[in-house]
Amino acid sequence: MENTMSNEDFGQDFDLKAEINKYLIHWKWFVLSVFVVFFITFLKLRYSKPIYNASTKILMKDTKKGGRLSEAAAFSDLGINSGTRNVDDEIEIMKSRTLSESVVKKLNFNVLCISHGKVLDIELFDNTPIEVHFVNQTDAFYEQDMHFEFEETLSGTFKLSSTNHFFKANQYKYGQSVKTPYGDLIITKKHSSDDKVQPLTILVKPLKEVAASYRSRLQIEPLTKGSNVIVLNINDPVEKKAELFLDCLVKTYNEKAVSDKEFISKNTSVFVANRLKLISEELVDVEKNVEQFKVSNKLTNLESESELYVTGSTEFNRKAIDVQVQLNVLNSVVEYVKKSTNENLLPANLFSDIDGDASTLISSYNDLILERNRMLKSATASNPTVMKIDEQLASLKSTLLSSLDKSQSILKIQKRNIEQNENLFNSKIQKIPSQERQFRDIERQQKVKEELYLYLLQKREETALALSSTEPNAKVIDAALSTGAVSINPRIIYLGALLLGLLIPVGIIFLIDFLDTKIKSRLDLQGRTQIPFIGDVPTSEDASTIMQSESRSSSAEALRIIRTNLEFMVSRVPEGIAKTIFLTSTFPKEGKTFVSVNLAATFALSGKKVLLVGMDIRNPRLDDYLTLPDRGFTNYLSSKDLSLDDLIIKQKGYEDFHILPAGVIPPNPAELLMSKKVDSFFETIKQQYDYIIVDTAPVSLVTDTLLIAKHADTFIYVARANFLEKRMLDIPNGLYRDQKLPNMCMLLNDTDSTKGYGYGYGYGVKVEKKPWYKKIFNS
């Protein structure tokens, strides 16, 4: 079956047992690690300083209704953002670096008094026998890290030295000012007792460093989700300091909140006052503009006068129409009178509103017409009476026309006067829209200024009330109180120590194994190659000594097992023909020559006739293990006179162990191995021996081994542990896949049998006892 394996096919199987064994063989390291971690944990628990927890509970006021003022809070009714705050915002403010630094500075927590014990140094606070004060501090005082050593000498005096070399050690009295570059140090005795004060260390830490320490330990969170009640917690080695810090934190927070509100109220008040002054001046100017407009346009009330003008214009228009109607009627009557004869009656009752005489004349005229018409019924027109009446009608008609003409003149005068008055009112009415627009502009400005003025007056009063009734943001529900030392469960600590003690060696072993790219055991071959594995050879105690019949070392036992496994590899070789075994490797110094020599000796000790041939003709190494002549295989190939019997020697101490040395290193090794004499050589010796062991050259450096590979019944590929890198397995895998080396198998040399990778070699062998510390480090 064609072998189509590739490098990517390897590494698919995971051997859990092998992985576990990889750690279990180092069990002594695990025991040592757990013991060390347990011991350190014991000391830590035994001498750790107790940590105290203090907590306080506060209520945030109106956090969702703009409880914290902003610069525009007074004008929130205009839709301006009033800077409302929620609980999360207030928590962040309380956690701020600025607030913590203010608290530490107020409480003087950056100055510490340390009492030295046999094991632990303890900070003294409320029980300190002295009080330390710094006065006249410079700006750099809160940025310095200062160290002072205090030691009381005589009554009322003490010795003070500075490790920062601010001054030389000297004697001082309590209450005396000690000059330092960053301020004056004054130390007073707290108690009036005569007890001597033990030596102390006075530390001055940078303000930011101390504040950062408290901030990292401060926990602030709502009591429940959505609640305005906030719980503050802090842990500290000094119980009283934890309580004071929380109380001062809340107090400082409220003071800053009140200060912010007062600052905002004062600024708002100043702003409103300035605006009121400006608006008042503008309002006066606008009112003067109203006054000037009414005076210049002779107005008192634009709306009432507009109605008056419209009413007057309407009235005169009606009168003008009436006069025109009367004038038109009068003109018609005049025309009628002029055209009328003594037979026609004149219209009566048309001019009573204009002239009463005309009506009387028309009535008299009509009476004469009626009288004349009555007489004509009984007389002729030449009748003297009729003629007299005609004369009277002519005279009366002339008088009537004069009267009508007079009435026409009067109506025309009335019409002209009415039109003049109507035009006057119309001109007034035409000016009203323009005046109304101008007045509305001025009036609008006046109203805006008035409303703004009144609004600012109201805000000034509101701001004054807010300034007088400023209250803190937070109300203390429970003052800070210590809940005692934070309890530590030793079982949990020791359990964690156990896990840590186990994880440390696991991590180290994993890291070493991860970074180690070299083959160490057969486990490293699993999943990386499919070449048959015939065994491993442990590290030999004396690599220069070849195997003897009495050998019971682990290497000897391993070679015997390999000899047995090889019988299966060469089982197909016919009887009567030597079983030819070639050995090669990737690089020199992998032990193929050592394995070749000892494997040949192993077969010889089993009663077989064995020939060991040195065919690594470029770098022969058989003489490192055996005493050999200079002539050998290369001399045979290059000479026509030499026979094999002249070159093959027998090894002393063995019945049938024969050796053919490599001989002199030739100038043309590859060409020499390609000669036909090599083929006849193998045909000859295969008829004379039971086993032929051939030591060949490394395959990665030269092509010599591949040139003679066809003569092998099986190829042993030797890989040395802790020498060959795992990635170099690509070379034997490629040779195996391409079948360039026939019947190939792999042997691992120089393994460590003490780590459990072998077969348990060395039964019955006396093992040297090692001290316990060597055993630990050897594992």
Image: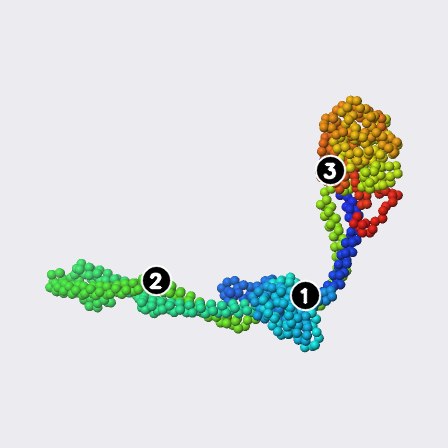
Circle 1 — which element? strand
Q: Position of residue 289 (x, y in %)?
A: 35, 67
Q: Is residue 300 above or below residue 527?
A: below
Q: Using the image, tell me which numbered label, if any, was put on residue 729.
A: 3
| Residue located 53% across and 69% down the image | 262
Image quadrant in which you'd find residue 65: bottom right
Q: Position of residue 252 (x, y in %)?
A: 59, 68
Q: Position of residue 472 (x, y in %)?
A: 58, 70
- What is the three-letter code of the residue carrying label 3? Leu
Circle 2 — which element? helix
Inter-mark Cα distance, 1 to 3: 60 Å
In this view of the protein, can residue 706 be seen by the observer?
no
- What is the three-letter code of the residue carrying label 2? Pro
Badge nearest the viewer, 1 or 3? 3
Query: Front-most of 95 and 237?
Result: 237
For the residue carrying disc 2, how many other residues have a C-alpha within 10 Å: few (<14), some (14-19), or many (20+)? few
Q: Position of residue 755 (x, y in %)?
A: 80, 45
| Residue located 76% across and 23% down the image | 676
Q: Is residue 749 above or below residue 75?
A: above
Disc 1 target residue: 236
Which of the image's four quarters has the N terminus? Answer: top right
Inter-mark Cα distance, 3 to 2: 107 Å
Badge nearest the viewer, 2 or 1? 1
